[in-house]
Structures are given as C-alpha cells and as structure tokens.
Amino acid sequence: MYRLLRPLLFRLDAETAHVLTLYALRFTQAVPPALGLVKLLYSAPSKSVTAFGLTFKNPVGLAAGYDKDALAVKGLGALGFGHIEVGTVTPMPQSGNPKPRVFRLVEDEAVINRMGFPSRGSAFVQKQLTPVQRTSTFELLLKLKPRKPNTIVGVNLGKNKSTPNEQAVFDYLTLLQDFAPFADYLTINVSSPNTVGLRQLQGREALEGLLTQLHAQRQLEEARLDKRLPLLVKLAPDLTDPELDDALDVILRAGMDGVIATNTTLAREGLRSARAGETGGLSGSPLRGKSEAMLEKVVRRVEGKIPVVSAGGIMSPTDAKRRLDMGATLVQVYTGLVYAGPGLVKKIVRAL
Ligand SMILES: Cc1cc2nc3c(=O)[nH]c(=O)nc-3n(C[C@H](O)[C@H](O)[C@H](O)COP(=O)(O)O)c2cc1C
C-alpha cells in the first residue's frame, strides 16, 4: 500500500507529509475498529528482549523526533514497534526553527532536518501520556485478562533554546521529574545538532555535572514512585575517538543504563541530491557507515556493562540484523520509515 501512498506524500513538503501521517495515526488510535485493523495488518511476531530491566516485545523501536509531542503513541504502537521514543520534549513550549526545515534527499535515501526542537512543552506531553482512567465493568473485566506486553514508551528530553548551557541541568532535572511517572525510560539528548551549543554538553566536564545530578534525582524518583527509571544518553556520530571515550567513561561512571548511538550527522560526504547543502542533521542511508563505526566502538568500550541502542541508517531488515549482530540490544528507525513505509517494522521483526 505504501508504494501507492509514497508518491503522493513525496509531492508534499516533507514536514507537511509528516504531520499528515502523524494525524492519520492519531485519528486511527481514537477509533477502535481502525486501530484494530492497523494492528491486524502490521502486528509483528513476538521476539522479546530484556534491557534496562524492561521487557520489549521486539528490539525494533521508533527513534525520537517522529512523535515529538506524543500525539499518536497508541497508533504508532499498532505498527508493531517494541518501543516508541517520544520527544524531544522541552520544559516550555517553543516553536523551533523557521520552516522549511525538513528536506528529503531522495537520490540518497536521506533526510536533512534543522527542526530545532519544536515542542508543545512538558505539560502538554505529560497530558498525552496520562493513562485514561478505566472505570467501566467491561474495562475492568478486560484488565483481568492476561495482557500481552505493551509497547515500551521512552521520553527523550532536551533543553529549551533560551536556556544557557550553564543552566541546562535545571531543564533536564525538571523534565526528569515531570516524566518519571509516565515514561518507561528517559533519554538525555545532548546530541541534536540544531540547538546551538547542545552538543557541547557531551564534553567530559559538562556531561559529568549533568549526569551526576540526573542520576541522584532519578534515585529519588525511583524511591518516590517505587519503579525503575532507566536513563539513556543519546550521542552524536560526529564525536572524535577521544571525545567518545570521555563521554562513555562518564556515562558508565555516572550510573547510566544505556547509550543510544547515534543522532543525525553534520557530515555531508558522498551526497548526490540537490538539497545536500541544506543546514541541519543528516539521517538515513548516508549515515549508515558512521553509525555502524560508532556502534562498534561503543560496544567495545562498554564491554557489556550497559546495553547499546543503535540508530542511524537502518533502512532494511539486513541493516537491523547487522546492528544486532554487532552487539546492539535494540535498534531504532526513523528515516527508513519515510522511504520504506510502516511495513518496515514487521519486515525487520520477522527477519530476526
Ligand atoms: C525530522 C527528524 C527529526 C528528528 N528529531 C529528533 C529529536 O527531536 N530528538 C532526537 O533525539 N533525535 C531526533 N532525530 C534523530 C533520530 O531520532 C535518529 O537518531 C536519526 O534520524 C538517525 O536515524 P535514521 O537514520 O533511522 O533516521 C530526528 C530525525 C529526523 C529525520
């Protein structure tokens, strides 16, 4: 079906097409028969994996940035994902960079985006993630049924543009407290290239200060809520080897639960598309090599102490299998969905 839909979507500006698909999924999740149909079409066989104390029904997740405001978590879950990472969420609402800010590079099977964290803000996203109270007898009876493992929901956290780096920790602490009750795990995003200075938070000293405080706050939240709250850190593919070593050293010592490698890249090697010169982060096929190289280094360096989540240029079942074989515990896709469509998730899971 996506073969028919794609040419129509590709006639639209990339962000418009994205908003359309997101709202189609939001509509779907509000209409039980429609949601049932999507589940029927896309449900993937169970291939469960355990990581950070959580059981994922399969290792394939949706990378951050697709559903920034948690508008369609249930609809996306119906596409077969083992986990959905919503966000990046910022504490206060902000509009992001001027449009156009997302570009398809069709010849390269890639996307460049310079969205700059448009977010409806923490309060809005919390409301989306608040479970609806179930009170009807029917619902109560349903609850008695043994439930299949749900889609895991992670929340990716970022600072507001107006927050200087020296105060970034307060943004992340606020968000950690805000989302502790609603998220299965949280991702500390210090790697998006579109917020000026954000990537500097990956430096040893800045990262150490940030993660130490977040870890302390996480422990308080875990005690308060009586649940585990895994913290992951998402890294850029453009770190040099010494920078990566420093970051991983800090991540391990600060008691983080996992690493996501990688975010988008600022590199532009070997592109053919006319849009190659656009400013922003590059994702999709051209990121494959960089992401794989980084995964290899991260896996070697963390020595199995914490799980590694691989993202970047996973466009096919072969790509996903390779990452898992290289030592990733989970994989995440984004740009692959743009080019291959939602059936990609099921295809990957089946192939594992
Ligand atoms: C349009 C777009 C928006 C994104 N927004 C975010 C974001 O808000 N936060 C984040 O951590 N990553 C964001 N990403 C990066 C993805 O989560 C992912 O790390 C990256 O695209 C590499 O995976 P891919 O090659 O499968 O797309 C975004 C990517 C794209 C294409």
Image (cartoon, helix red, strand yellow):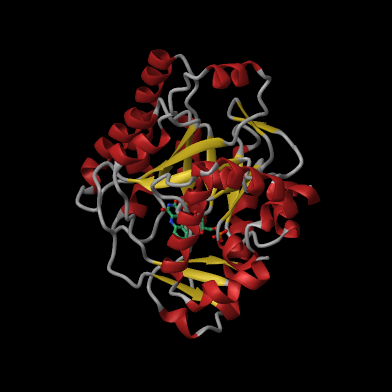
Residue situated in front as seen by the camera: 248 or 341: 341
Up-down relation of residue 161 to residue 222 (above or below) = below
Residue located 64% across and 42% down the image: 36
Whether residue 269 is visible to the viewer of this picture, yes or no, is no
User: From this viewpoint, which residue is outermost toward the right?
Assistant: 351
Residue situated in front as seen by the camera: 95 or 342: 342
Q: Quadrant of the N terminus?
A: bottom right
Q: Position of residue 286 (x, y in %)?
A: 58, 70
Q: Quadrant of residue 279?
A: bottom left
Q: How many marks?
A: 0
Relative side of 242 to 287, left or right: left
Whether residue 22 is visible to the viewer of this picture, yes or no, is yes
Q: Position of residue 151 (x, y in %)?
A: 59, 36
Q: Position of residue 278 (x, y in %)?
A: 40, 77
Relative side of 208 to 273, left or right: left
Residue located 47% across and 41% down the image: 233
